[in-house]
Image (spheres, rainbow, N blue to C red):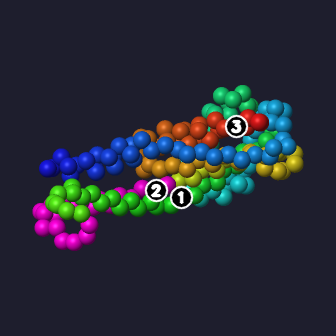
């Protein structure tokens, strides 16, 4: 009987530990992305991002790693500018579990349920969204935007890993594959 009560908690832990980042991207279909080889950060935009400086540096390091892996070089005279934007919101999840003892169908009072067949759990998490914008440095026009949505962690040992996952999955969609 105690095993049945632990099942919802175990399922919740499994689901939250397997949380992934969902990514989306959009781009200007008239742009040829091949000539872009160098980048720099759009400092006025980066300075406006309302997150801790520590997290901001984690994001920028992860972007540097991904861009360099793609063959881009950081430059004082870049082809494109990189900007970021973040937002977050609290998620509250309420889960109810009923062991389902008793008899019959439908509504009504069930004397068997009052002996501990119901369990409600409430959990909270923070869902974060990271936008990475790529801007043509000469035209000052956005050419590509990637977005990643996922659960954030407050665990300092896992922050670097989680941010790298966000950035890696977002930038995996750049350059876009034209159809």
Residue 174 badge: 3
Question: In this rendering, does residue 166 appear at all?
Answer: yes
Give the magenta-colored segment's residue range: 106-127
Between the C-alphas of marks 2 and 1, the distance is 7 Å
Seen at 64% across and 35% down, the residue is 172
* Front disc: 3 or 1: 3
Q: Earlier in the sequence, mark 2 or mark 1?
A: 1
> Residue 116 sits in which quadrant?
bottom left
The correct choice, above or below, for 178 with respect to 117 in the image is above
Can you give x and y, in whole percent of width and height, for residue 60 in the image?
A: 62, 42
Residue 126 badge: 2
What residue did someone put label 1 on? 88
Seen at 34% across and 49% down, the residue is 12
Seen at 42% across and 56% down, the residue is 125
Left or right of 108, for residue 111? left
Between the C-alphas of marks 3 and 1, the distance is 24 Å
Task: Mark 2 and mark 1 in contact? Answer it, CB < 8 Å.
Answer: yes
Secondary element under disc 2, as helix, strand or loop, is strand
Q: Earlier in the sequence, mark 2 or mark 3?
A: 2
Left or right of 45, for residue 123? left
């Amino acid at each position: 009987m105690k095993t049945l009560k632990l099942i919802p908690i175990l399922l919740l832990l499994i689901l939250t530990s397997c949380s992934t980042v969902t990514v989306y991207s959009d781009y200007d279909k008239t742009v040829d992305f091949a000539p872009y080889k160098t980048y720099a950060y759009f400092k006025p935009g980066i300075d406006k991002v309302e997150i801790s400086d520590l997290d901001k540096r984690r994001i920028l390091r992860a972007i540097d790693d991904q861009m360099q892996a793609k063959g881009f070089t950081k430059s004082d005279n870049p082809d494109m500018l990189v900007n970021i934007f973040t937002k977050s919101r609290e998620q509250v999840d309420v889960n109810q579990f009923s062991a389902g003892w008793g008899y019959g169908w439908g509504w009504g009072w069930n004397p068997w349920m009052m002996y501990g067949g119901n369990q409600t759990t409430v959990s909270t998490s923070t869902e974060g969204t990271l936008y990475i914008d790529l801007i043509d440095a000469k035209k000052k026009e956005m050419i590509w935007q990637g977005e990643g949505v996922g659960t954030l962690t407050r665990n300092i040992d896992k922050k670097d890993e989680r941010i790298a996952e966000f950035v890696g999955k977002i930038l995996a969609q750049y350059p876009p594959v034209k159809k």
